[in-house]
Amino acid sequence: MAPLTPRLVVPIDVKKQPWEQKVPLHNRWHPDIPPVADVTEGELFRVEMVDWSGGRVRDDNSADDLKFMDFTVAHYLSGPLRIVDSEGVPASPGDLLAVEICNLGPLPGDEWGYTAILERENGGGFLTDHFPSTRKAIWYFEGIYAYSPQIPGVRFPGITHPGVVGTAPSVELLNIWNEREKRLSETRPETLTLCEVLHQRPLVPLPTPDNCLLGKVQEGTAEWHKIANEAARTIAGRENGGNCDIKNLSRGSKVYLPVFVEGANLSTGDMHFSQGDGEISLCGAIEMSGFLELKCEIIRGGMKEYLTPVGPTPLHVSPIFEIGPVEPRFSEWLVFEGISVDESGKQHFLDASVAYKRAVLNAIEYLSKFGYSKEQVYLLLSCCPCEGRISGIVDSPNAVTTLAIPTAIFDQDIKPKRMNGRPLGGPQLRRLPDLLSCSNDGHLPATQDKSGTSAP
């Protein structure tokens, strides 16, 4: 007998706002956000999701929607789902929840996504000191492939995955998060930098009732106000999983999540058609609405058995991820090295962030020789299936990192070769106009040929 169609537990209508959905969504972590449905372990079920912004980002010719985005909306999640065994007994604190991704993809009829550079003063990103202004590229999907009118000459298969998958924290764990993150926020900002650049504002997204959506909890009630002022934001990955942005977490993968509350209260969202390692531009995957088809298994007592705490309490654990067998096959890569010496020539001691920044900058400088603007390359490296690695972390004074780019995603040969007097890039060399400002057209521009007319 053929298997049953997955049961739809969270449907999404992309024409409606997040708070108008048939099954309530939420955008915070808190143990008192009630589950919207029960799921039995072993059952194949389907969860649909809005994009992280809840439809605020549009398929249009402007990046104003991202430049002026209020990031207290992030991320709109589907769930929580209460997981029970075949006898109806819910998962318990101390269990391990194995979540298998059986299938996933964009929502039918909504097959497009976007990638963006965020404004330095409104989110920033890994290279915000080099790219401080908002830019947006739109991507369209052709089956497993994505292409963008704003980054021409590139087409690649996506490794589609959820950016966010996690369980609800207990009261004790939520207090740990809020206390440690509040202490960090109280540190003088100038003392907290990444690659000596204060790259994100604010340093820590603390609890706030602004734009807070709490599922079944009615806004304006005493219960809502209490939860909204305590609930953790979803931007960071934490002990419960959450926003881990692991790009290879696609079909056939499993996530082993710690259970902190009765029923586990599983939530997911932030679907990505594709992403490069690090999601460097922050809004850097190909963001989209989408669906997951999942199966869950409860491993009783699994936290103690398999997750060793690294920290002062038994709650200081991390999920385990098992990567599935389905990935694009690329045979040729260009690999760019970075060492922990910054752009000014200053030596840093085994700093992998500085080294990875150098690797990314080296790749951007190289690929910009083939007719792409540096903004285009920055976005491309954030969302294409490139591979980031820490190659060395012990050979002082330099950490060594690499960024590997599959050459097959380009429609031209990007490998170094003797030029014989020809310009780099050969006959397909592209020269692009200056980028337009957000108030007019925040897209990256379509390519133009030397006459100034649009090129195919």
Image: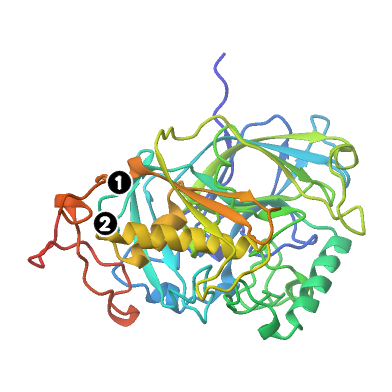
Task: Say which quadrant the N terminus sits in.
Answer: top right
x and y percentages locating residue 415 in the rendered image = 32, 45
Q: Would you identify the image quadrant in which residue 397 lies? A: bottom right
Q: Nearer the viewer, mark 2 or mark 1?
A: 2
Give the residue pinned by disc 1: 410
Numbered tag placed on residue 370 in the rendering: 2
> Residue visible at 45% across and 63% down?
361
How many other residues sit within 10 Å of disc 1, few (<14), some (14-19) or many (≥20)?
Answer: few
Q: Where does residue 442 sit, x and y in percent of width and height?
A: 33, 73
Residue for point 63% across, 65% down? 235
- In the rendered image of this protein, does residue 362 appear above or below residue 89? below
In the displayed structure image, the side of residue 229 where residue 48 appears, left or right: left
Would residue 362 appear left or right of 434 to someone viewing this image?
Answer: right
At x 36%, y 67%, the residue is 375
Q: Amino acid at mark 1?
A: Phe
- 288 vs 400, left or right, is left
- Determine whether the residue tagged by mark 2 lies in a helix, strand or loop: helix
Find residue 302 and report its horizontal and vertical position in percent: 86, 38
Q: Nearer the viewer, residue 173 or 31?
A: 173
Residue 454 visible to an observer of this rendering: yes
Which is nearer the eye, 272 or 24? 272
Q: Residues within 10 Å of mark 2 (few under 14, many from 20)?
A: some
